[in-house]
Image (cartoon, grey):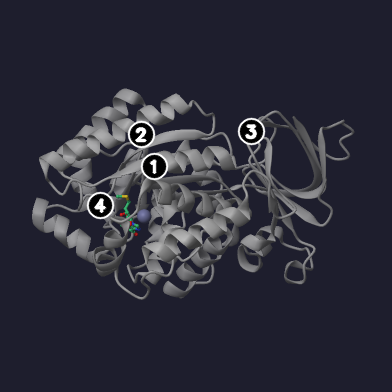
């Protein structure tokens, strides 16, 4: 299959140069970017007045949590999890997870996300939904043992089951991640097991760290050190670790994260909504830590729109530091694209010849996106996910002119409504 996208404003390369050009895709890769490409293609997209952008990478979410959207708002993390989220999650069956993930994936595709990192349970359903929808997915089973050996063995079994399932699926778009939930829910034994298995299998790891003040206090009381020091002393931290949140970090912890090449995923909406705090973004960037961007789950955000997330990062750090020069549009655009790709070791996140064709077309023929002047600024500060018109993943058109081609969207909406009506 070949696709020619014509006459667009292309956000080109890692430097985000905006050029008027065509983009030619052959198979699953970008083959040529240039003016007036005179090449025959199976499919031609007219991008006049539109922007051809790298797809967004949601580096931390829990896609089936769309089922819990609106379940409990205006609460701090622990009360939200313990009193509302976990009791509801105990009721979720594999079929619920499949439909929830499908709805979450439709939402992501429609708002320009081409790859996501997920942590949840009954993940076989998330893999199936991702495969059907055509999105790129990095899937982990969220392990929680709370120091209990029997529970630990059960969690290990579930993780290995998912690993085997994904290996057998043998999809070019779906990969396995290890997913220990957090240092406050996982024992040192479990974290050490994850590190050993990750080294052995060459698979990557995702985890929550330093999200709230309380959790940091809990780890300090239990182990006599901060969470990052604790993980480091276990030998857990390496460049294959993608850690969500990183809100409450000491200077020493930032130094360790930078030295070990850990990626931190910033989730500003979730951190603001749960009142968790403000991540020290400037310090992390200055230390050279790779910062990607995520939405977290739809129950703490409450959507999966990466374009909205970019605006939130920028505004949050400007107001928190009383400094409008911080978290500028180009920096946050890179967080949502190329930094995410770096965390996944994925040859995407920028439009250039040879890269994977994970591309979105954003329609600028709209009042709130005119005049066309500073395109990156418009995407970050003026646009939202609804402005994404076409989504191409791995060289396949999964959404065209706002319509998802791979999934029956209406059926997914109805099915999720029925499930949630029954569960609640
Ligand atoms: C065990 S599967 C993943 C687990 O994580 C929970 N979760 C959702 N959002 C957050 C968050 O911000 N911090 C910590 N844990 C979170 C989710 O509900 C699942 O139980
Ligand atoms: Zn999370």
**Do the residues under discs 4 and 3 have CB atoms within 8 angstroms?**
no
| Element on which disc 4 rests | helix
Residue 14: x %, y % from top left: 62, 43
Q: Which residue is mark 3?
A: 355
Q: Eyeballing the image, is 241 above or below 335?
A: above
Cα separation, mark 1 vs mark 4, equals: 35 Å
The kind of secondary structure element at disc 1 is: helix
As helix, strand or loop, the secondary structure at mark 3 comes to loop
Ligand 1 under 8 Å from disc 1 Cβ: no
Disc nearer the start of the sequence (4/2): 2
- Mark pair 2, 3: CA separation: 29 Å
Where's the C terminus, which quadrant?
bottom left
- Image x and y of residue 204, in percent: 37, 35
SS under mark 2: helix
Q: CA distance from mark 1 to mark 2?
A: 7 Å
**Disc 4 versus disc 2: distance between alpha carbons?**
35 Å
Instruction: Work out whether mark 4 precedes mark 3 in sequence or the reverse, and give the earlier one.
Output: 4
- Residue carrying label 1: 123
Q: Earlier in the sequence, mark 3 or mark 1?
A: 1
* Sequence-earlier tag: 1 or 2: 1
Residue indicated by mark 2: 162
Could you say where residue 409 lies in the image, as x and y percent from the top left?
61, 53
Residue located 36% across and 71% down the image: 72
**Which residue in the protein does label 4 denote?**
252
In this view, 224 is above or below 236: below
Upstream in sequence: badge 1 or badge 4: 1
Residue 117 seen by the camera = yes
Q: Residues within 10 Å of mark 4 (few under 14, many from 20)?
A: few
Residue plotted at (68% across, 37% down): 396
From the viewer's perspective, tell me whether residue 119 is left or right of residue 182. right
For residue 363, side relative to residue 344 (left or right): right
């Amino acid at each position: 299959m070949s696709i020619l996208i014509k006459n667009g404003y292309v956000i080109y390369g890692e430097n985000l140069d905006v050029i008027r050009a065509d983009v030619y895709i052959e198979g699953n890769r970008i083959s040529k970017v240039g003016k007036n490409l005179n090449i025959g293609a199976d499919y031609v997209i007219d991008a006049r007045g539109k922007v051809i952008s790298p797809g967004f990478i949601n580096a931390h979410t829990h896609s089936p949590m769309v089922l819990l959207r609106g379940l409990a708002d205006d609460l701090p993390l622990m009360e939200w999890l313990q009193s509302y989220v976990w009791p509801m999650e105990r009721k979720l069956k594999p079929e619920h997870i499949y439909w929830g993930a499908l709805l979450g994936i439709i939402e992501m595709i429609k708002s320009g996300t081409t790859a996501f990192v997920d942590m949840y349970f009954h993940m076989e359903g998330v893999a199936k939904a991702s495969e059907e929808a055509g999105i790129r997915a990095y899937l982990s089973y969220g392990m929680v043992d709370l120091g209990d050996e029997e529970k630990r063995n059960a969690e290990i079994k579930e993780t290995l089951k998912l690993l085997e399932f994904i290996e057998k699926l043998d999809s070019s778009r779906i990969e396995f991640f290890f997913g220990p939930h957090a240092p406050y829910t996982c024992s040192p034994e479990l974290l050490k097991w994850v590190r050993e298995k990750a080294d052995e299998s060459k698979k990557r790891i995702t985890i929550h760290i330093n999200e709230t003040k309380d959790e940091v206090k809990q780890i300090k009381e239990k182990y006599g050190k901060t969470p990052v020091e604790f993980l480091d002393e276990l030998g857990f931290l390496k460049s294959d670790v993608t850690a969500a949140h990183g809100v409450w970090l000491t200077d020493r912890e930032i130094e360790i994260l930078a030295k070990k090449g850990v990626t931190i995923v910033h989730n500003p909406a979730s951190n603001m909504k749960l009142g968790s705090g403000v991540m020290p973004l400037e310090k992390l960037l200055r230390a050279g830590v790779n910062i990607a961007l995520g939405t977290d789950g739809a129950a703490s955000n409450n959507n999966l729109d990466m374009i909205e997330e970019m605006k939130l990062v920028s505004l949050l750090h400007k107001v928190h530091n009383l400094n409008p020069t911080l978290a500028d549009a180009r920096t946050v655009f890179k967080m949502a694209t190329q930094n995410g790709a770096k965390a996944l070791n994925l040859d995407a996140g920028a439009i250039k010849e040879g890269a994977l064709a994970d591309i979105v077309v954003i329609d600028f023929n709209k009042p709130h996106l005119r005049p066309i002047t500073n395109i990156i600024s418009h995407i970050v500060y003026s646009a939202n996910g609804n402005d994404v018109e076409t989504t191409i993943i791995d060289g396949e058109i999964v959404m065209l002119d706002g319509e998802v081609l791979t999934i029956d969207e209406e059926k997914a909406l109805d099915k999720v409504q029925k499930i949630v009506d029954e569960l609640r």
